Amino acid sequence: MPRTTTASFPSVELHNRSGKGPVVILCEHASPDIPEPYHDLGLDPAHRFSHAAWDPGARDVAMALSRALDAPLVASRVSRLVYDCNRPPEAASAMPERSEVVDVPGNRNLTEAQRAQRIESVYRPFCTAVTQRLEERAASHLPTALITVHSFTPDYHGKPRTVEIGILHDADRRLADAMLAQSHRLAHRQIRRNDPYGPEDGVTHSLKLHGIGHGLANVMIEIRNDLLGTPADASTMADELLLLIEPALAELGFEIPIRGDAHDA
């Protein structure tokens, strides 16, 4: 499916903008793309398309959820190594000099002007696109929950991770609790709360800014990326996640749409 962008926000990808389902979906690490002026940030070629640069499979899952839930999707079209849209500008990890074992030479000794340029060209447009979707829905009196979709590496600093699906939350745990209450529907999966990351790791920025900040029930879904090796795998995972998401939304009083493909707008 072709990507939908706007001339004003070339760093942001929008899908199903007018979707009427009960959810807005974010995918902050959807792309490994590094714009040409950044010269691949000096990355070792072996790391150029690694998990350090993006969340493999997350966009495919987010797209499938967008279609199933008739949900608007906002995704970044720029690698998180240029700017991580799930981090505030003051965070060192917004433009990291090192990501796990990956050195990022192009992020060393950035000037204030260079940092400001990335904030204005990547982070601000993403936040503006999300805010616009939420304000449009509020004006149309559409009940809304916020879901962010991520993937994580099976091994971190040489240690294997057994968790397969992480259900993450910050102070507002309504949607996470409701989804975890349905985890028996996926008895074959290792599903955990705030694992492999949690609020203490600084990963709930989007939940706090766009979810809690707008009074919306919200959750972050983390999927181990070896389960997302192909588009078919991502589609299967999306179907499994819907077994948690749909009854959780219903429990919170949201109306679940009849399944069907959504259209880009």
Image (cartoon, helix red, strand yellow):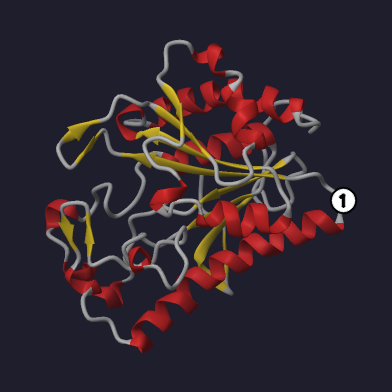
224 relative to 173 in the view: left or right: left
Quarter of the image holding residue 217?
top right
> In the picture shown, does residue 207 fall above or below 132?
above
Residue found 67% across the figure and 63% down from its top: 131
Q: Residue at x 41, y 33 (%)?
A: 223
* The one of 46 and 159 positioned closer to us in this rendering: 159
Residue 120: x and y in percent read: 49, 78
- Amino acid on which the number 1 mark rests in the picture: His
Residue at x 56% of width, y 12% of height? 185
Q: Position of residue 28 (x, y in %)?
A: 47, 54
Element at badge 1?
loop
Asked if residue 189 is positioned above or below residue 206 in the image, the reply reads: above
Q: How many marks?
A: 1
x 21%, y 52%: residue: 100
Q: Is residue 98 left or right of residue 168?
A: left
Q: Would you identify the image quadrant in which residue 95 lies?
A: bottom left
88 vs 84, nearest the viewer? 88
Q: In the rendered image, which residue does mark 1 sit on?
A: 141
**In the image, is 17 to the left or to the right of 122?**
right
| Disc 1 packing (10 Å; few <14; some 14–19; many ≥20) | few
Which of these two is toward me, 4 or 37? 37
Q: Position of residue 107 (x, y in %)?
A: 25, 73
Foreground: 12 or 264? 12
Which quarter of the picture shows residue 133?
bottom right
